[in-house]
Amino acid sequence: MIGVSKNGTLDYAKLEKMLGDLVLQKEDHVNAPAFVIRPDAVEETLTLLKDEAGFDHLSCVTAQEYEDRFESIYHLRKYDSPQHELGIVVPSPKSNPWNQSASSVFRTADWHEREAYDLVGINYVGHPDLRRILLPDTWQGHPLSLDYDQNKPQIITLQEHENPLQHTLDDNTMFINIGPHHPATHGVLHLKTVLDGEHVVAVDPDIGYLHRCEEQMAQGLNYRYQIMPYPDRWDYASAGLLNEWAYARAAEDLGNLEVPEYAEILRTMGAELCRICAHFLAVGTFALDIYGDFTAIFMYAMRDREIVQSILEDLTGQRMMFNYFRLGGVVWDLPEPRNEFLSKIQTFLDAVPAGIQEYSDLMTSNEIFQLRCVDIGILSPDVARQYGVTGPVARGSGIDYDLRRDDPYGYYSNLDWDVVTEDGCDIYSRFLVRLGEVEQSAKIIQQCVSLLESWPEDDRIIQSNVPRTIKPPADAEIYRAVEAAKGELGIYIRSDGTQQPARFKIRSPCFSNLSTLSEMAEGGLVPDLIAALGSLDIVLGEVDR
Amino acid sequence: MINFILNTQTPLVDAIYHLLGFDGLIGTIISAFIAAFLIGNIMLISAGIAGPWAKRKITAVFTDRIAVNRLGPFGLLIIVADAIRLLAKELIVPEGVDRPSWDIAPLILPFSALLGFAVIPMGGPLQLADPETGLVFVFAVASIASIGVVIGGYSSNNKFSMLGGLRAVAMNIAYEIPLIVTAASVVLFAGSLRLSEIVSAQADPLIIIAGVAIPSWFAFVNPFAFILFLVANLAEIGRNPFDIPEAPTELVAGYVTEYSSVYFVLFFLGEFLHVFLGGAIIATLFLGGPAAPISSLSFIPGFIWFLLKIWSVFLFTQWMRAAIPRVRIDQMIEIGWKGLLALSFINLIFTAVLVGVIA
C-alpha cells in the first residue's frame, strides 16, 4: 500500500508523490495534512487514493464559502486504520462554484454532496441526482452561503399538490408514501416507496423534516460556553454525552486544551452509560417494529433504560439534555454521597448479565424472530464501506471499526474491553452487536467505577485551566470524530480567529447509515423494509440536524 | 318457514316461550327476538369488558405496567369513559371513499360474529338454535367477516387500507381450510355436526386418575388437533403472530386506517367478538362446551364454565400478542399452505383411521 511507512504511520510525502501534478498545494489541518486539487480532478484523485493508498472511507464532505472562493473538503480515512487521515481540498471560483462529483468513487458522496449543494450551493458536476436534501425543493438560496439573507422570509410552496393515489406509474407498480407520519419511521422520516404487490421496487428516503439549522446555530455561538448544550439535541435519544464529546474533542484539539485524567474517567463512564441507554432504546423500538405491538420486550427495554437514565440524572442533573461536558473537563464531580451513587451504578451493573440473558431468551432465541431477521436486510461489507457506514451497523457487517479503540480518546485505551463484531451482515447481526455492546459498555463502566472509588481525594480535578475566551488561530481547521452510539460522529470546525467557529459541520453517522436503506430493502417485502429501517437505529434529530 | 322454525331445536327460545306463556307463531317470533337480544348482549358485554379494560390490564401484567386504575374499582369505569370518548368523536369521512360500501363494511364484522353465537351451546337452555348443521353454520357466518374487511380496505381510498384488505383475504383463504379440516376431525369423533351433540360426546370420562375422572374432551383425546386449531384460530381472528392485516408498524392500521369514531368502534367491537367467537368454537369443539372439568365441580352453572373457557382463549390470544413477533406475510402464507394445511389433513386421515378401527 502506497503511503504507509514501515512503522505504520502515514507518509504524506509519498502520497504527494503518487498524486504528482494533481496536488496544487499542501495545507495543514490540525488533524491531518490536506492536499489542494483542481475541481476537475476530484474523481481521479479520490480513485487513486482509494485504490492505491487504501483510503476506503470517505467520512465527511464539508463545503464552505470564503470571501474569495468556495471550497469542498473530502475527509478521507481508512477503515482498517482510522488514524490515517487525509483531507482533499477542492477550491472553486466564486462566480461559478463547481467541482466534479465524488459519487462515482464513493457512494456516500451522493448524499453528502447533495447536502453541500443544498446548504452552501456548490454545483457537483456528474452527480447522478443533485437535488436538495434537507430543505424543501422550493427553497430560495443556500443558507450557509455568505450572501444569504437570513431575515428574508421564505414562502414554502409544494411544487404541486400531489395526490399519491393519482401517482400512477406506467408498469404495475404502486407508489406509496411511508411517513412522514407512520408508526415505524421513528420520527419524521418520509420514505417514497414504489411497491410491486408487497415487494419493494424502489425506496427513496426523504429527510429534512427535523432540520433545525444546528450547524448554523453553532456558527453563531462561542466555543467556550454556548455550543455545548446543542449537541445533546442532535441524537436526542439519550446519547447526549456522546455527542457532547464529539464537540468537546474537536474544540479541545483545536484550542489545544488539556483534559485531566479524572475528568476523562468521568467522561468515559458517562458516555458509556449513554451508549447503554441508546442501545436499550434501539433494542426496544426494534422489537416494536418486529413484534408489531407494545410487547414485553419494549417495556423491559424502557424499564432498564429508565434505571440508567436516573443514574445519568444523578450525575448530570438532567435526564436527556445533559450539558455535562465543558471544554477541558466536565461541569461537576460525582454527586454526594459518592458511595451511594457508585453503589447505585454497581447495582445496575450487577443486573446487566441477567438482563441481557432475558433479551436473548425473548428475542434472539425466538424462532419467529430469527425467521424475520436472519438473512434479511443484507449489507455486505463492501457496500457498507462504499456508503461510509459506521457504528453497530458496520460492525454487524463484519467491519472491525471502532474509533474508541482505533483513534483513541478519553480513557478507553487504559481499559480492558472488546469491539463486538458479527459477520452475518443482516438485521440479526446488528441486533446482536447492540446487545454485545451493552455488555462491553457495562464492562467499561465497571472499570471506571473501581477507578473512581479508589481515586485519591486531593487529585479529583474535574476541569483543566481553560481561558475565559477561546480564540483558536485564524484559518485553523480540524475534523475530529468520536464513536457515538450510532457510529462515527465527526465535527469539522474552521476558525476565523474569533470566539465563534466560521464553519461548523456535523458528520452524522445516522445520515450515512440511512443512505444504505435502499440497498437493503429493495427487492424485499414491506415488513423487511420496516425491519431494515429499525435495524439501522436512526434518530432523525441527528440525520437532519 | 314455520316448519323450519318449529323444527329447529331452539332451547332458549322454547324456555322463554314457556316462561312468558306465549302462544302461536307471533309468540315464537317475539321470544326468539328476546332470546337473541339476551345472547347478543352477553357477548357484547364480554367484548365491552375485554376491549377497553381487560386487554389493557392483561397486557399490563405481561409488560410490567399498571394500566388503568383511576376510574372506579380496578379502573373498571374506564369502559364507560372509553365508550363516551369513542362515540363522541367526529366521524371523519375521507374524500373519495366508496359509499355506501364504506359504511357497510364496519357493520359486517360485528354482525357476522354475533350471528355465530346463535348456535353455540352456552350451558343449560342458553342456546338460541341448535340446527343439525350447527358447525357449518358457525364457520360460514364467521367467514363473512373477511368480506367486511375487504370491503373496508377497498372502499377506503387508501393504499394502506387496500394492502390490509388484500392481506386479510390471503390470510383467510390460507387459514380457513386448515381450521375447518381440523374441525372435521372432531366431527369424526362426535359423529355429528350438531353442536349440542358434539358437546355431549365429550361428557364421558376418558380416564380416571386417583379417583378424579378426566372428561373425554377432544382437547385431551386429540391434543394435536387442539393445537392445530388454536394456531389456525389465531390467524382466523387476526391476532399475533398473524395480525398482518392490521400490522400497525407496516400498514399503519391496515383496513381500519381511515375509520374513526363509531365506525372504528364497530370494527374494534367486531374484532373482539371474533376473538370470543373463536373462543366459543374452541370451547365447544375441544373443551367440552359448558361442562365442568371434573364432575365434583358441576354445581357451578355451565354458563360460568363457558364464560371461563372463552375468556381463557382470550387470555391466550393476549399472551401471544405480548410475547410473539409477527411473521411476515409470505412466511405466514407459507406456514398456512405448506404447514398447517398438510398437518390438518394428516390429522384428519389419522383420526378417520383411528375412529374406523375403534368403532
Image: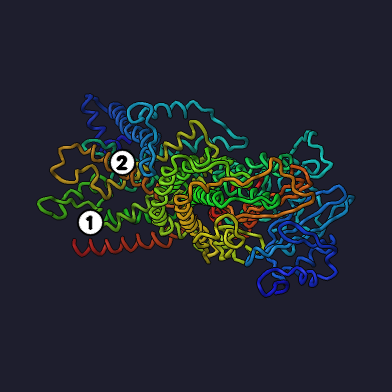
As rendered, which of B14 and B331 lies closer to the eye?
B331
Which residue is tagged 1?
B221
Say if residue A509 shows up in the picture: yes
- Residue A316 placed where, x, y %? 53, 40
Say if residue B168 shows up in the picture: no
Quarter of image, res A225: top right
- Residue B57 placed where, x, y %? 36, 37
Mark drawn on residue A291: none
Indicate the secondary structure of the residue bearing disc 2.
helix
Say which chain tag 2 marks: B
- Residue B82 placed where, x, y %? 43, 29
Horizontally, is A522 left or right of B317 in the view?
right
Gap between marks 1 and 2 measured at Cα: 22 Å
What is the residue that sits farthest to the front in this orientation?
A458
Which residue is tagged 2?
B311
**Which amino acid type is marked by label 1?**
Val
